[in-house]
């Protein structure tokens, strides 16, 4: 009998047998994420000259084969230091050997222009047809463009 009284004494009264309500959990607000703007490349703009910022000076729809140099420029936004951009060129679908080039971004860039040039060094004029460029970033972004090469200015 002694054992039972100890157990009963340990259990307390019948009012104590009701479950104690569990306090409602306090909701902790989730941290708000700061939106990081996504990197982007604009459309390729063609020109025979660029400004000091690398923007096209004279946007072209066609390129005269008598010109010496052409620029392919893209507006780049939200690139980070260490990202790179590479341009590869082709004429009429045929790659131009030795014409590819790469530039590495030196500091975080909210917005700016990246320009790549191609100079014709042959005795003959540029061939007629279509000049193409693909500009690819190390982050996987790409911008492609093409421009007809035509005779006569």
Image: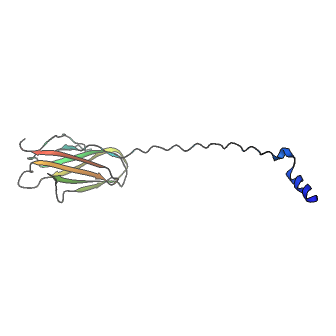
Q: Position of residue 95 (x, y in %)?
A: 17, 56
Comparing 67 with 27, the one in front is: 27
Picture mark count = 0
Q: Position of residue 46 (x, y in %)?
A: 19, 44
Is residue 113 found left or right of 65 in the rendered image?
right
Quadrant, the C terminus: top left
Q: Position of residue 28 (x, y in %)?
A: 61, 44
- For the point 82% across and 47% down, the residue is 17
Q: Quadrant of residue 42?
A: top left
Quadrant, the N terminus: bottom right
- For the point 71% across and 43% down, the residue is 23
Comparing 104 with 10, the one in front is: 10
Whether 59 is drawn above or below 97: the answer is above
Q: Position of residue 91 (x, y in %)?
A: 14, 52
Is residue 89 found left or right of 20 in the rendered image?
left
- For the point 85% across and 51% down, the residue is 11
Is residue 124 found left or right of 4 in the rendered image?
left
Q: How is the image coloured?
A: rainbow
User: Looking at this rendering, what residue extends furthest in the right direction?
Assistant: 1
């Amino acid at each position: 009998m002694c054992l039972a009284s100890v157990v009963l004494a340990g259990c307390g009264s019948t009012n104590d047998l009701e479950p104690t309500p569990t306090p409602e959990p306090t909701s902790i607000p989730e941290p708000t994420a700061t939106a990081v703007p996504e990197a982007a490349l604009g459309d390729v703009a063609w020109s025979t000259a660029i400004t000091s910022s690398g923007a096209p000076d004279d946007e072209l729809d066609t390129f005269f084969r008598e010109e010496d140099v052409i620029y392919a420029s893209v507006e780049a936004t939200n690139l980070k230091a260490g990202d790179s951009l590479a341009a590869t060129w082709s004429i009429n679908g045929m790659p131009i050997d030795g014409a590819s080039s790469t530039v590495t971004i030196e500091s975080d860039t909210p917005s700016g222009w990246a320009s790549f040039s191609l100079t014709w060094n042959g005795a003959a004029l540029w061939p007629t047809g279509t000049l193409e460029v693909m500009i690819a970033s190390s982050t996987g972004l790409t911008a492609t463009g093409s421009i007809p090469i035509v005779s006569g200015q």
